[in-house]
Image (cartoon, rainbow, N blue to C red):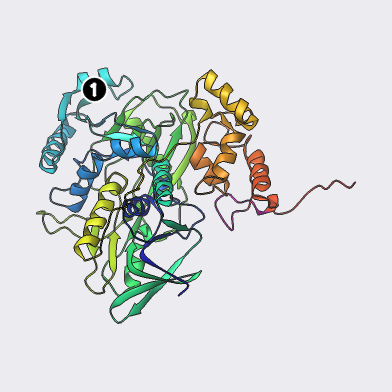
């Protein structure tokens, strides 16, 4: 084995990155590995961007406990890591008298889960709070602890802070198996060779079941991807001020309509079980279901308000809770019993984003209880500075920034007012953005009406220049997604 670490974390989604940050507090050698070209490229970058209050999970489940505990941690996280988080609350909206009893059930469920400040409001009050709401609204459940967040910004911020405090990150590094010494895990096998470890943390998201099985653990556990389709709406056309959930069904929380930290409202998700863990394609049936669900809450929506769509996959597992009368699909957060040296995090679907910081703390507690010595670093720094966002600055601040670096005066993305200076700063950031999508997720370029038609050629050239490679090597999201296949013109001197 080429190197050895105290802990290797498999998977750099929001959960893996939060675990890495939590462990960076201690005198440990920690490696975070990710098979993709960037952190947070799975469910962490394609979800509803909601911090859930905690009334939805079944009482007595790990989901419920982690949701409520995690929810309370996001204000501090956003302050320390400098990403957008808005605790604006959320509503579950009943349309028609027949849906009102569901609000009572959710209210009682939230009370059992320990969700503070829940309140049932009338249809009149709901119409006052959100004028575009369906006029047939009969009432709503108001949860003031709900919120919205930039999920990718939170993921990359946690990862950057972990690296600042000594964690190592290895991208484009695929896990393929464990190195065993009897029943003890002593390393992991990757496409970059074998790496030693005392503990492995399985935070592999959709592939957490396959990682478990490589260790001979939980052969009965399986993850079934659930496809969620979304619409992105034009913020200049749609004015939705709140997070609006429908009454949930057996398929999940339902199709919501919500604002986002970036301004463009989103609609979704659908919920379709499937087999392919890589299939993120939209379907005509799913998009129609999406639209009907959106118009149930906000009938005034028009199809020409849609500027984009995307698809996310949730890692739905089959582990059941034993504590509720009707068993519910639950999170797995455990020290594996069949082998030594493995912590499993499986079936971390919604509310996985909300729960991520609480899951990370639970991993620390599990490692401590299992005997790993945790000595705090005296110089651990919880703060991650945020790089400038030109569109958020005052005129005087913008002028000062341009005087320091003229590249901040060159607008590359007109819709979102993203400058060349911001793009270059991300290319050379703590976790270098080396693909178009990596820059897009960090700066939000390419997300406006034109969907990158103006900025993408410029961004390809900037990436090539800053990385010192040919434009033919620049990709959208990693190897196999190159923008260009050949030169069409050449200039002979």
Q: Position of residue 185 (x, y in %)?
A: 32, 74
**Range of magenta residues:** 473-481
Measured as percent of width and height from the top left, residue 311 is found at: 43, 47
Locate residue 90, reporting x and y percent: 26, 31
Q: How many numbered marks appear?
A: 1
Q: Give the image quarter of residue 86.
A: top left
Q: Looking at the image, which residue sits at the far bottom?
A: 182
Q: Answer whether residue 324 is magenta in the image.
A: no
Identify the main secondary structure in magenta. loop
Horizontal and vertical percent position of residue 189: 43, 72
Q: Is residue 91 above or below residue 175?
A: above
Residue drawn at point x = 64 percent, y = 50 percent: 467
Depth check: 10 or 130 in front? 10
* Residue to which mark 1 is pinned: 126
Residue 74 visible to the viewer: yes
The answer to whether 228 appears left or right of 2 in the picture is left
Position of the N terminus, as image quadrant, is bottom left
Q: Nearer the viewer, residue 166 or 118?
A: 166
Please report the residue visible at 45 percent of the width from the left and 36 percent of the height from the top. 386
Furthest-right residue in this view: 493
Question: Along the horizontal axis of the image, is 100 left or right of 203?
Answer: left
Q: Taking 45 as reference, is 7 above or below it? A: below
Instruction: Give the left or right position of residue 283, taking residue 458 as reference.
Output: left
**Magenta includes 478?**
yes
Q: Is residue 241 above or below residue 80?
A: above
Regarding mark 1 in the picture, which secondary structure is present there?
A: helix
Q: Nearer the viewer, residue 316 or 475?
A: 475
Seen at 39% across and 34% down, the residue is 84
Query: How dense is the environment of label 1, judged by Cα within 10 Å: few (below 14), some, or many (20 and up)?
Result: many
């Amino acid at each position: 084995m080429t190197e050895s670490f105290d802990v290797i974390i498999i998977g750099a989604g929001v959960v893996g990155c939060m675990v890495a940050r939590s462990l960076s507090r201690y005198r440990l050698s920690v490696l975070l590995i990710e098979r993709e070209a960037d952190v947070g490229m799975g469910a962490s970058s394609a979800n509803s961007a909601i911090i859930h209050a905690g009334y939805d999970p079944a009482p007595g489940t790990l989901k419920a406990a982690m949701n409520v505990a995690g929810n309370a941690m996001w204000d501090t996280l956003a302050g320390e890591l400098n990403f957008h988080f808005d605790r604006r609350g959320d509503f579950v909206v009943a349309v028609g008298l027949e849906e009102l009893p569901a609000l009572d059930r959710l209210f009682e469920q939230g009370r059992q889960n320990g969700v503070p400040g829940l309140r049932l409001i009338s249809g009149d009050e709901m119409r006052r709070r959100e004028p575009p709401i369906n006029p047939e609204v009969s009432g709503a459940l108001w949860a003031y602890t709900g919120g919205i967040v930039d999920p990718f910004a939170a993921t990359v911020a946690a990862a950057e802070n972990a690296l600042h405090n000594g964690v190592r990150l290895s991208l484009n590094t695929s896990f393929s198996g464990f190195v065993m010494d009897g029943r003890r895990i002593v390393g992991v096998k990757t496409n970059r060779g074998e790496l030693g470890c005392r503990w492995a943390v399985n935070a592999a998201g959709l592939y957490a079941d396959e990682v478990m099985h490589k260790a001979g653990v939980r052969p009965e556990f399986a993850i079934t991807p659930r496809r969620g389709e979304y619409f992105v709406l034009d913020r200049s056309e749609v004015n939705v001020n709140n997070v609006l959930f429908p009454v949930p069904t057996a398929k999940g929380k339902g199709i919501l309509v919500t604002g986002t930290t970036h301004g463009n409202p989103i609609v979704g998700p659908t919920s379709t079980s499937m087999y392919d863990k890589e299939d993120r394609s939209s379907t005509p049936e799913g998009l129609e279901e999406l639209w009907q669900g959106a118009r149930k809450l906000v009938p005034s929506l028009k199809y020409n308000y849609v500027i984009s769509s995307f698809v996310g996959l949730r890692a739905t597992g089959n582990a059941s809770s034993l504590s509720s009368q009707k068993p519910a699909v639950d999170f797995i957060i455990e020290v594996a019993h069949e082998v030594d040296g493995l912590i499993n995090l499986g079936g971390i679907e919604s509310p996985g984003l909300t729960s991520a910081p609480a899951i990370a703390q639970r991993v620390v507690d599990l490692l401590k209880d299992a005997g790993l010595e945790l000595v705090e670093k005296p110089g651990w720094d919880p703060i991650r500075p945020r790089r400038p966002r030109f569109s958020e600055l005052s005129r005087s601040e913008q002028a000062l920034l341009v005087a320091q670096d003229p590249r901040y005066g060159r607008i590359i993305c007109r819709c979102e007012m993203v400058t060349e200076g911001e793009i270059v700063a991300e290319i050379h950031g703590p976790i270098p953005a080396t693909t178009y999508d990596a820059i897009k997720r960090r700066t939000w370029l390419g997300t406006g009406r034109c969907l990158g038609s103006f900025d993408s050629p410029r961004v390809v050239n900037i990436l090539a220049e800053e990385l010192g490679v040919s434009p033919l090597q620049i990709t959208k999201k990693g190897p196999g997604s190159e923008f260009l296949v050949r030169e069409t013109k050449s200039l002979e001197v």
